[in-house]
Amino acid sequence: MSLTVATDPIPLSPDSDGVVRVSNTRVTLDTVVTAFLEGVTAEEIVEQYPSLQLADVYSVIGYYLRRKTEVDAYLKIRQERGIQVRQENERRFNPIGIRDRLMARLTHQGQS
């Protein structure tokens, strides 16, 4: 009996914003790789994200290990973009005193 060796496609695809997602889920490559780097097993990742298939998680981890430099560069860009977005939001919506503003709004609504 012989084994037919087949190459399965990597279950990753970029969405319209360029964010790489696993299979047809909302789970990002960032999420799986970060969990893996924190020592979370593939089984635990699937437990946390039931929309993922175990074989896909192993495939994504293998992809990361084979293309670590490229994926790390992608993750760095995503992290930098996240910092930019956070800073933009903080400039637009100053978080200092937000609790007081929300409480004042709640009190004002309660009086209406």
Image (cartoon, rainbow, N blue to C red):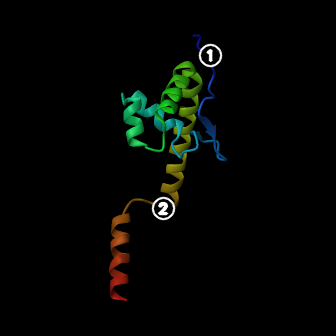
Q: Compared with residue 99, is residue 14 higher up or lower down, i.e. above or below?
A: above
**Which residue is label 2 attached to?**
93
Secondary element type, mark 1: loop
* Circle 2 crowding by C-alpha within 10 Å: few under 14, some 14–19, many from 20: few
For the C terminus, the image quarter is bottom left
Q: Compared with residue 2, is residue 73 higher up or lower down, i.e. above or below?
A: below
**Number of numbered tags placed on the structure image:** 2
Identify which residue is drawn at 38% across, 29% down: 41
Are the two marked residues, 2 and 1, in contact with CB atoms closer than 8 angstroms? no
For the N terminus, the image quarter is top right
The type of residue carrying mark 2 is Phe
- Looking at the image, which is closer to me, 25 or 100? 25
Please report whichever mark, 2 or 1, sits nearer to the chain's N-terminal start. 1
Look at discs 2 and 1 and give the one toward the viewer: 1
Residue 12 x/y as whole percent: 60, 35
The type of residue carrying mark 1 is Thr
Residue 101 x/y as whole percent: 37, 70
**Which residue is label 1 attached to?**
4
CA gap, disc 2 and disc 1: 58 Å
Q: Compared with residue 24, is residue 54 higher up or lower down, i.e. above or below?
A: above
* Circle 1 crowding by C-alpha within 10 Å: few under 14, some 14–19, many from 20: few
Residue 33 x/y as whole percent: 47, 31
Secondary element type, mark 2: loop
Is residue 93 found left or right of 4 in the rendered image?
left
Identify which residue is drawn at 45% across, 60% down: 94
Looking at this view, name the residue that lies furthest to the right: 16
Q: Quadrant of residue 97?
A: bottom left
Looking at this view, name the residue that lies furthest to the top: 1
